[in-house]
Every structure is written in C-alpha cells, then in structure tokens.
Image: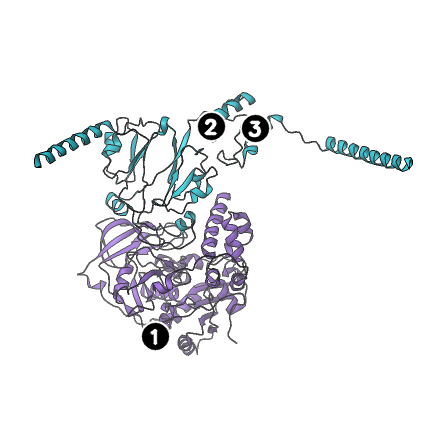
Amino acid sequence: MTNSVLYSVLLLSSLGGIAAIILYVVSKKFYVYENPLIGEVEDILPSANCGGCGSPGCKAFAEKLVNYEDISSLFCPVGGNEAMKLISVALGKEVAEKDPTVAVVRCQGSCDVRPKTTEYQGPKSCAISAMIYSGETDCQFGCLGDGDCVSVCKFDAMFMDESTGLPIIITDKCTSCGACVDACPRNIIEMRPRHKKDLKIFVGCLNEDKGGIAKKACEVACIGCSKCEDICPKGAVTMADNLAYIDPVTCTLCRKCVDVCPTHSIIETNFPPRKVKKVETEVKANIESVKLNADA
Amino acid sequence: MLKTFPKGGIHPPENKITSTKSIKRMPTPKVVYVPISQHIGIPAEITVNVKDKVEIGQVIAKSSGFVSSNIHSPVSGTVTKLDKIIDTSGYKKQCIVIRTDIKDESNFEDIEYPLKKDISLEPKDILQKINESGIVGLGGATFPSHVKLSIKEGAKLDCLIINGVECEPYLTADHRLMLEKAEEIIVGIKILMFALHIDKAIIGIENNKKDAIEVFKNLIINEKSIKVAALKVKYPQGGEKQLVRAILNREVPKNGLPLDVGVIVHNVGTIFAIYQAIQHNKPLTERVVTVTGKKLENASNYWVKIGTPIKDLVDEVGGLPEGTRKIVNGGPMMGKAIKNMDVPVTKGTSGILVIHEDEASRGEQKNCIRCGECVDVCPMGLEPHLLMNLTEKGKYDDASNEDIMTCIECGSCSFVCPSHRPLLDYIRFGKHIVKKLNTAKN
C-alpha cells in the first residue's frame, strides 16, 4: 500500500521535473528579445487600434516609435500631445507637437435645401454610389448620405441625422483619427483645429460649379461671390474654382464672413448669440409694439 | 446544333420590339453637346475655341495619346461654349457645345453614299485613316479601334470575327444595320482583311436574327474567305471572349486578349464606320441608336448625330410615357441609367431604353441562400457571391486572387439572384479598387 503511493508520487514528480527541464531549455533556446520599451510605449498609447497614425495598430506604432531614430513625423492623433510628451520622456527622443483637431462636415445639403432629382437604388455605400454617378441630387460635390463615414468611426463619434440625411460629428467623442476623412469619397470631412469652447468657422460647401448652377442644386451652396474674401481682415479666405476656403490657421474667428455670406454657406458653431443683432431685433420689436399700440 | 459558348449564360426576355423598324434619320438638333471623353483611355484635347466656326467632320478635339481618339464635329455651326455637362458617366465632364447653323443645308441633308467596292488605299494608310477618323468600338466598350488594329510584328493573326450578335435584350441597332447596310459591311470586312493581311473572316449572328443571317449568306455565296456563323441565342454571347469560344472553340486566356489566340473581334457598327471612313472619307459623327421601351409610342431605330441630347430622341418617339421611372443608356443588362435628359448621345450609345415604373424597381436585398445560381450562370467561371462578400469586407487582395478582374460585368449574376443581391454593383466596385491598388503598386 505504502509502495504504490510512493511509486505514483515518484513517477509524477519525475515527470514534472522532466517537463520543467524541457520547458526551461525551450524557453532559453527560442527566446525572442523584445525591447521592453515597446511594451512601455504601448501602454502609453490609447490602445484604440484605429489606424489614425498610419500603422495597423498601437503595437505596430509603438515598434515604429522605438525603432525609428527620427520620430518627428509620427504622431498619435488620439493620444494627442499628452501621450506624445510621455513617449518623448520614455524614449528620450523629440516628438512632434500638433494642435488638437476635430473633424467637421463641410456640407449642409439637407433634404430641404438640396432637392433630390434622382433616386438611387444600389447598395447603401457612398463609395459605390460615387463610383456609379454623381448622386441623387444635382450637386456632384456634396454628401451622398449613405454613411460610409459613420460605419468606419470606431469611437461612436458620428451618426446620421435622419431629418437632414447628413452625418453629425459628436465633437467630444471625436479623436481626430481621420478614418472618416479617408472613407468619404467626396472628401467632405476635414480636420480643423479644435478651438476653445469648440468654436468653429468653416465653409460648409464644396461645390465648384458656377454660382447659378450651384445655387440651383442647393440653396446653401457657396456661389463663389468672394464677399467673404473681401471682408476678411486677415486674408484667411481664398477663392478657387468658384469656392471659398477658410484657412484654419489664419482665421481669427471674427465672424465677419458669416455675416456677409448671401447663401449662409459659412457655418459658425457654438458662438454666443450676436449682441448687435439682439439690439436690432429688440428695436424692431419695440417699433412694432409701438405701431400696434398706435393702431389700437 | 448551333454553336455557343459552354460556360454559364442566361436567356433574358428578348423584347426586340424595334427589330422590324427601319433606321430613320433623327432631325439635326439645334445644339449639340460633344463630350471630349467618349472612349476608353485619355480624353481628347480640345482644338477649337469659343465662337469658332466648324464644319461637319472637322476635328474639334484631337487624340492625346495612343489610347485616345479624335472627335469630329457632328454638325456645321458655331462653338458657343466649352462647358461641363453631365454625360453618361453620371458626372459633369468637359464638352464642346456647338450651335447648328440653320442656314447651312449640309446639316440637314441625308446623303446616301453609293456603294464603293474598290479599295484604293494601302494597308498602312487604312490604319492611319481609321485612327484619324476617330473610330472606336461601337459595341458599347468604345475602345479606340486603331489600338486594336495595331498589331505587333510577329503576332500570329488568322481570323477576323465580326460581332453581329447583339445579345442585349431590346437593342436592335446592329440588327437593322446588318439588314440595311449588308453590302457595305462586307466591303468593310474586306478592307480590314486587306489591311491586316488575314484571309478568314466570320460573321457571328445569333439565331434570333434569321433575316440578317439570310442576307449575309446570300451575299457571300461567291466569297470563299467570309463565312457566317449562326449562333444559339444566349446572353452574353456578344462578349469578345464568349464569341471567340463560341465560333472558333478557342479559349482566350484570362487577362488576355482575343489577339493572343490569333483573333480580332469587331462589331458590325465599327465595320460600317470603317467602311465609311475609308471609302467615303467620313469620320465617325453619327451612329445607330435604338430608342425603345415597352410603353413608347413609336419606338424605333435612328441615325443620331453624336452630341444630340437624349431629350430630343425621346421627344422624337412621342415623349416620355406616363409613369416612366428610368431611362437607360444602353441595354437593360449592361446599360446605365442616366441622370437627366440633357445627357448627350456619345459614340458608345447603342440604345436608349425607357423603363416603366412597373419594371424599374430593384427587389429588396435579402441574405444569400447559397443556391449557387450566380456561379452557374457566370460566363467567366467566377463565383460572384464570393467576390461580392470579399469586396463588402474590404478583402481586395483575396478578391484579386479570385480573378475579380476577369469579370466582364455582364450582370447575369444579379439577373438570376433570387435574393436580389446587388452582386454586380459590388464586383464593379471591387474591380475599381483592385485596379487602383494595382496601379499604385506599379
């Protein structure tokens, strides 16, 4: 009885010992050296695996950061400057510093202002419908509304507004990874600097047609009248192909261009209501009430 | 047993409503819109300016490369604009707008050229002339003809196949042309045979055009080198590779051309255009267009000047019937719906099909039930369901390995799919991306 117990204990422990030796030898022989810095850097990165940096994932990007000597051209848009600073400390290399950006949709062609002239019955994909033709409306530059950008967003920062048929970006969630910019066949989505309080001014149109044609296709199209270019005190507005473009760096958010745009194609967001206008409306209201009183 | 290709194929309802209607002449439009990109390859370069006076047949845009083609003015008149208008691609493209000179009678004459049989040009000059005359494949692909005909020395070439199949439902343009211009087409074939030093030509015609087969058989009684092959009715027999396989039993290699098996294929329309260019010095400025549709009052075939807005064609046949949903440039299988009625007729417009709303809608897309119908009918032996899935998932490398690029876009798979899956839409998109990736690689 004692013998059989002894045998089994001996057999199992010797088996265990042999297995341990094999494992030890194998792990020594096939050991792959990995720079511990890679793991360290990977921990700093946001682990979103979004591909916004140009690498297939955070691990691959970390390898690049560690292995390349000059990493000034590499940047993680999701982690932003904070993450890059930590990486700089960890690796002792200089990193690029970029202002935070946010995606904006440069099209306001909702169903009300941009009537549909044809009907598309193909697969629900902007890329396919863009390959087939210029879209359901007469504007061949605007949003196609099939939501390719929404489907590629990994951060749930976009959704399609069903009433307008246009994508909407939730600024707080946007990490500016750039997936939507690449997905849009019309290049409607642009990365623009993230200002304080999320203030934004940009031309919400990409229509390069001449004024009349553009306006016919969409009520809020840029007609290339150059009024914004003339009024801009900083020269931030440039005109090309019947289309205005506001340079985000030179723009000081003075809102003068917004006021002069005859088609309201320049979008301003999150600004406080205008004081001047308020006074005007108040005065108007007063005058009207006075009139009403007089009539009575 | 009639010849046909072995793999796949379908037999959609023929609906050749206009097959008995002789080709009429469409009145010359007041304004023509001539796109500069009417062929596969590089767009032509505009050689005229606004306010220039142009004559019929004058070059208004010059070929700008080897795979490119001249474009000639279809009318005599004045260039009023160089504008961008929506063409058959669905996008705004550069085009030349010419206002027809009403006083110039040459715009409205219907010249019937006498049959001219003697060939006076040398082979080299013939090819040169074809290049200058802006002739492109009129079957629908609009590949510049001179490229097809410039054969490298040493290439083995023994047979010319004339494509009179017209397997697309509804279209009858080639059919009518074969009936009405048979003798000219025979001369055209001889011109090409002479220019290419070939001594064998076969005209392939599907058996639903028995009258055309009869006409040609009577004409070639004394010709030893030209033959007529009656083919079983099956779509897409008009595809080059299918036609070569059907007539000569030769398999064109994948990613290859018929030339690789010693064959050149030309459409009957192209042959007639070549005849006119060589014998009558007439560049390609008009073509036969079938204007058809079940609800149209006077569906018929027309000689149409390139650049005529499709609106004019529809007005000519009695206007749009009520409940029209789609207007297709080309046939129902491979044609493409146009965006508006101002789209002009180009060299590749073989038909205008007006579809009523009863037949225009696509069925609701459902899940693939793995029935394998699409695999059965694919004339290229591909697996359309797989190609669609791979494209949908963005696996373009795998799609490329599954030979997505050999797809001839005949649409048989989408036609038979019981789940109404948009197979061809996805495959086209996949091809588009694979092509882009390949050019990026090189």
Amino acid identity at mark 3: Asp
Pinpoint residue B72: horizontal percent, then vertical percent. 30, 57
Pinpoint residue A29: horizontal percent, then vertical percent. 74, 32
Pinpoint residue A213: horizontal percent, then vertical percent. 26, 46
**Helix, strand or loop at mark 3:** helix
Residue bearing mark 1: B20
Amino acid identity at mark 1: Thr
Q: How far apart are the two marked residues, 2 and 3, measured between alpha carbons?
A: 14 Å
Instruction: Decide if residue B96 is on the left or right side of residue A194.
Output: left
The purple-coloured chain is labelled B
| Labels 2 and 3: the sequence-earlier one | 3
Up/down of A295 relative to B15, above or below: above
**Residue A255 sits in which quadrant?**
top left
Q: Nearer the viewer, residue B396 or B41?
A: B396
Tag shown at residue A43: 3
Q: How far apart are the two marked residues, 1 and 2, measured between alpha carbons?
A: 72 Å
Tag shown at residue A80: 2
Pinpoint residue B386: horizontal percent, then vertical percent. 54, 55
Residue B257 in sight from this viewpoint: yes
Amino acid identity at mark 2: Gly
Up/down of B187 relative to B31, above or below: below
Among all residues in the image, which is located at the extreme front?
A296
